[in-house]
Image (spheres, rainbow, N blue to C red):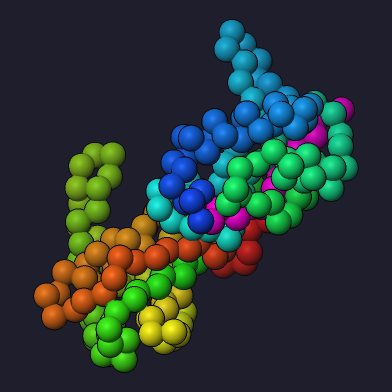
Amino acid sequence: MKTTVRMKFTKKGRAKYISHLDLMRCFQRCIRRAELPIAYSEGFHPHMQIVFAAALSLGFESDYEVIELGLSEQLPFEEVKSRMQAVLPEGIDISECYAPKHKMGQIAYAEYEIVLGCSDPDKLLVQWREFINQEKIIVEKKTKRGFREIDLKEFTECLSERIFDNELVLDLRLPAGSTVNVNPSLLIDEFGKNEAISFDYPKYCRKKLLCTEKTEFF
């Protein structure tokens, strides 16, 4: 009997340099090695029934990646998890395996932790607050039809700001749905355009995916 299994996994360390396309290929190979009874689409060019939620930018780490598998027969969730974990590369770890609760189209937001190393984090925090408290933050965003101006202030929720180990750590919530999707690097790049502001190359980590109601996506 066909069944659907959803897995949540982390993508850390060197794995953050695996592109989304290569990640798809990686999982396809691992599914074969794990000998899972994967279901295939019908037609002249059958392909594995696997779906990823919200592609992650290259160079970003994540605590909350999601993949959905269609299986041609039922297997215990723990067995699917253990088989896959045994063959996945370093940096990719499955944290949960479960039956889907939400539809992929219900994803609307993502939460990120952004770490900015600098020589003076207290000064950087003041500069950040001045920046994020502006009435508008207008940037050009690339779309399928070219570039258009958007107001990042309208879409950004700053959940927390803290200084830890000589770094400024920001927790942000941004749209991540199919109609509105804002990459946090747009905001940080705009912040860094001021010549008076200086910080190391940002470190990004996606912490959660959320539904329209801002509840956790499962």
Q: Is 59 in front, or is 207?
A: 59
Q: Residue 112: horizontal and vertical position, in percent?
A: 47, 67
Q: Which residue is at a point 32% across and 86% down the rendered structure image?
A: 121
At 71% from the left and 56% from the top, the residue drawn is 95
Report the quarter where the N terminus lies.
top right
**Image height of 157 relative to 18, above or below:** below
Q: What is the magenta segment's predominant secondary structure?
A: strand
**Quarter of the image where one finds residue 60:** bottom left
Looking at the rendering, which quadrant does residue 122 occupy? Answer: bottom left
Residue that protrudes farthest toward the left in the picture? 195
The extreme top residue here reads 44
For the point 58% across and 60% down, the residue is 63
Would residue 155 appear left or right of 103 to someone viewing this image?
A: left
Residue 8 in magenta stretch: yes
Numbered range of the magenta stretch? 1-12
Q: Is residue 157 left or right of residue 120?
A: right
Q: Is residue 196 left or right of residue 39?
A: left
| Location of residue 162 with respect to 15 vertically, above or below | below
Residue 46's quadrant in the figure?
A: top right
- How many numbered marks have been drawn onto this rendered protein structure? 0
Q: Nearer the viewer, residue 124 or 100?
A: 124
User: Does residue 187 belong to the magenta stretch?
Assistant: no
Residue plotted at (59% across, 8% down): 44
The C terminus appears in which quarter of the rendering? bottom right
Query: Residue 203: x percent and y percent?
Result: 39, 65
**In front: 109, or 129?**
129
Q: Position of residue 66 (x, y in %)?
A: 61, 49
Tell me, yes or no, if residue 19 can be seen here: yes
| Residue 133 seen from this side | no
Horizontal and vertical percent position of residue 92: 60, 49
